[in-house]
Amino acid sequence: MAKHKSDGGLGFKILHKFNLAMLGKQGWHIINRPQSLVARVLKARYFSTQSFFEAPLGSNPSFLWRSIWETLGLIRAGAYWRIGNGQSVSVWGQPWLRELPESLVSTTPPLNCARVVVSDLIINHRWNESLIAQMFNKRDRSCILNIPLSLSSCSDTWCWKFESKGHYSVKSAYRFLVDGFQHREGSEIWKRFWKAKVPPKVLNFCWRALVNVVPCLSSLQSKRVPVDPSCPLCHVAPENVLHILIQCPFARSCWLSSPLGWPAPSASSLNEWNNVVWKGQGQTASGVFFMALNFLQQWKAARVVSSVSTIVDPARPIWSPPPHGWIKANIDASLSLQRGSVGFGCVIRKDDGSFVVARAGSFYSQMDAKCAEAIAFREALS
């Protein structure tokens, strides 16, 4: 039941990991808000001469600190420095590469360079590519050059690598605790199954049948309950999920009465089986079919939603002018994975469409598309 829905489960939370994910937010506040009262008290008590990541549990710790300390591994795995001016981040020993799973520099530090900070690798808000090529291996060089730099001298900040915006979230932390660094693809069959437009109780019954947890006599016998496993309808074969839904002559009669042509079990049939077993009641195959058909029609009638059509004007212009007295910048970016470079271009026009200025350029990087678009926007404003 705690498995993800795309893996055949019901998506229930694992309480221990979910609790760690929520506690991790408190640890995240300690490193992002060191001037807060709680952070200063905990630092003075437990790690006065160390960083939060090096903090020991200590002797006779409080319940609060013991709980937060348990999230150190989680915070250490997801936190990294977002480079601003680079003055507060050490090149070696601190995580500042936005890389999964390792954010530390893997290159061995040269002699007398252990205390080099990231700002020593930056010249005029650009990476010193020649120096980086001399000091780092191929993996580190690629990761460093993919980090965009700000044109303003903003300070370095902690970011969460499992969220695109860099903010800690309980959802992403829990996902990491469950799946680790592996990306869950999930089963396409299960994804389509949970998107089926059927009543929830029917969907729940189908899930029970697929994972073989429908109550039946064979299951009771496997749990050492002294019962006769024979099907109470046909008295020919043991009653299991496959027999109940497909192989039983009564089940086959139900499907033959239906125009569907493939097994489509209804949750109401479970009630019928219970009535047969416990109350000695039953229905004909045609009665089961018409009952299911009536239930489906009632459900569809309850879901009728008025649709609103959207009219698209084919004569809509490609370029829309800005308000009067304003100028408009159109930007775009392109990625070349073979050459490992990013190209950008921007055009600025007035409200009457007249040309003002344009700019284009390229630089070495392997960043994603969103980051490349942001760089193009930054260049348009500079």
Image (cartoon, rainbow, N blue to C red):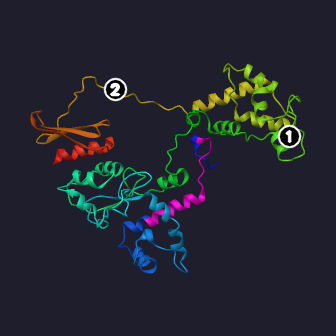
Picture layout, residue 181 above or below residue 43: above
Q: Is residue 211 left or right of residue 380?
A: right
Picture layout, residue 37 above or below residue 308: below
Residue that appears at 54% across and 50% down:
179
In the depicted view, which residue is nearer to us: 158 or 286? 158
Q: Mark 2 points at which residue?
A: 311
SS of the residue under disc 1: helix
In the depicted view, which residue is nearer to us: 115 or 238? 115
SS assignment for the magenta stretch, majority? helix
Q: Does the magenta stretch include residue 177?
A: no
Residue placed farthest to the front in the image? Answer: 111
Query: In the image, what residue type sits under mark 1?
Result: Trp
Residue 357: percent from left, percent from top: 10, 39
Dot 1 crowding, Cα within 10 Å, few <14, some 14–19, many 20+: few
In the depicted view, which residue is nearer to us: 313 or 219? 219
Q: Is mark 1 in CB contact (under 8 Å) with mark 2?
A: no
Spatial separation of the CA atoms under disc 1 and disc 2:
58 Å
State which region is magenta: 7-27
Residue 85 appears in the picture as rendered: no
SS of the residue under disc 2: loop
Residue that appears at 59% across and 60% down:
16
Query: In the image, what residue type sits under mark 2?
Result: Ile
Residue that appears at 77% across and 41% down:
215
Q: Is residue 265 left or right of residue 281?
A: left
In the depicted view, which residue is nearer to us: 166 or 327? 166
Sequence-earlier tag: 1 or 2: 1
Disc ID at residue 278? 1
Residue 375: percent from left, percent from top: 24, 46
Residue 197: percent from left, percent from top: 57, 32
Residue 177: percent from left, percent from top: 53, 55
Quadrant in the rendering for residue 135? bottom left
